[in-house]
């Protein structure tokens, strides 16, 4: 029998043994790893969605700014309309980030963003004001993604504030010579120790190995740029093997 990291085990209401994706589970059901796409680009979101492996989307102000063609005329209403379009494409959580700094403003903006679609998850930064906003929003039944998380202490606070997701930024930590995935492993262990329901969403992913390591650490979600999603499927032996199969299949002729 294979073992699952504790964090990957979710309590089942049914007291039975189930077979799920190659893993026998006693009294537990496994929640499969979720893949979100990390972009605000509608074409990339549609392309990833068509692959049939997409569970959600994360955006941030920088990702939105990247797709704006006319920044001088892009309004907050345009931003909300863009989030609504993403929600039309993907049937899953769509993170939209607040762009204010005080708790009261974040709460008001978070409520507005959440009213766009039931799938909107409000992203709040892990600051003291952000924590107050997270507590208020989650208390009102609005799902929150704690963003810009760079330490286990911040992750504990996010869980205590009722965040649905915590987003450790692995790539940005790697950039400053600190092992980002080490933080993910710490958070998974700490949440497991106390049974916090907050899902670990690995953000700032830069390459396929980050995805593999996130899966090995038992993270709940990886949010992945489109380029890296494409790289996940690539292997030179697949390409050369396919080329050979196609060449050999040419002797079959045509009907
Ligand atoms: C997603 O939620 C984060 O905002 C994003 O992954 C950050 O990625 P970056 O560090 O590549 O900007």
Image (spheres, rainbow, N blue to C red):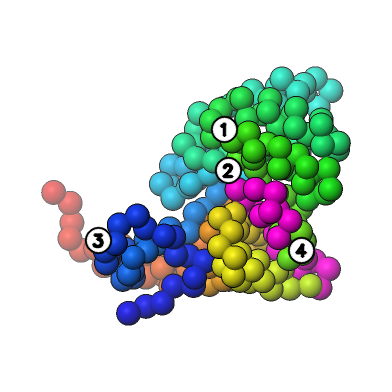
- Residue 86 disc label: 1
Do the residues bearing badges 1 and 2 touch, measured as CB atoms within 8 Å? yes
Q: Nearer the viewer, mark 3 or mark 4?
A: 4
* Mark in front: 1 vs 4: 4
From mark 3 to mark 4, how far is it between C-alphas? 60 Å
Viewport quadrant of the N terminus: bottom left
* Ligand 1 within 8 Å, label 3 CB: no
Q: Secondary structure at mark 3?
A: helix
Residue at label 2? 57
Q: Which residue is mark 3?
A: 250
Q: Which residue is mark 4?
A: 153
Between 150 and 106, the residue placed more toward the observer is 106
CB atoms of marks 2 and 4 within 8 Å? no
- Kindly report the distance in space between the C-alpha atoms of the residues bearing marks 1 and 4: 32 Å
Query: Which residue appears farthest toward the left when viewing the image?
Result: 255
Q: Is residue 43 visible?
A: no
Q: Earlier in the sequence, mark 1 or mark 3?
A: 1
Identified at 86% across, 36% down, the residue is 102
Mark 1 crowdedness (10 Å alpha carbons): few <14, some 14-19, many ≥20: many
Occupied quadrant, residue 171: bottom right
Q: CA distance from mark 3 to mark 2?
A: 41 Å
Using the image as rendered, state which of residue 62 and residue 134 is in the foreground: 134
Please say whether residue 175 is one of the residues in the magenta stretch. yes
Looking at the image, residue 4 lies above or below residue 172: below
Q: CA distance from mark 1 to mark 3?
A: 42 Å
């Amino acid at each position: 029998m294979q073992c699952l990291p504790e964090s990957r085990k979710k309590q089942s209401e049914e007291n039975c043994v189930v077979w799920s994706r190659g893993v026998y589970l006693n009294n537990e059901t496994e929640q499969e790893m979720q893949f979100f796409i990390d972009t605000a680009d509608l074409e990339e979101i549609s392309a990833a969605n068509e692959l049939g492996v997409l569970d959600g989307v994360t955006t941030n102000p920088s990702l939105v700014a990247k797709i704006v063609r006319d920044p001088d005329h892009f309004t907050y209403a345009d931003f909300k309309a863009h989030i609504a379009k993403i929600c039309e494409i993907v049937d899953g959580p769509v993170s939209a980030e607040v762009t204010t700094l005080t708790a009261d403003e974040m709460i008001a903006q978070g409520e507005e963003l959440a009213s766009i679609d039931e799938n909107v998850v409000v992203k709040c930064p892990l600051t003291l004001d952000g924590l107050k906003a997270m507590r208020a929003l989650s208390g009102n039944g609005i799902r929150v993604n704690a963003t810009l998380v760079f330490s286990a202490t911040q992750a504990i606070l996010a869980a205590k504030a009722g965040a649905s997701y915590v987003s450790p930024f692995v790539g940005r930590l790697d950039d400053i010579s600190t092992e980002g995935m080490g933080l993910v492993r710490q958070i998974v262990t700490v949440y497991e120790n106390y049974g916090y329901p907050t899902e670990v969403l690995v953000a700032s992913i830069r390459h396929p190995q980050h995805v593999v390591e996130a899966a090995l650490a038992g993270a709940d979600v990886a949010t992945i740029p489109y380029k890296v999603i494409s790289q996940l499927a690539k292997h030179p032996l697949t390409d050369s093997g396919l080329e050979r199969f196609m060449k050999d299949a040419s002797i079959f002729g045509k009907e």
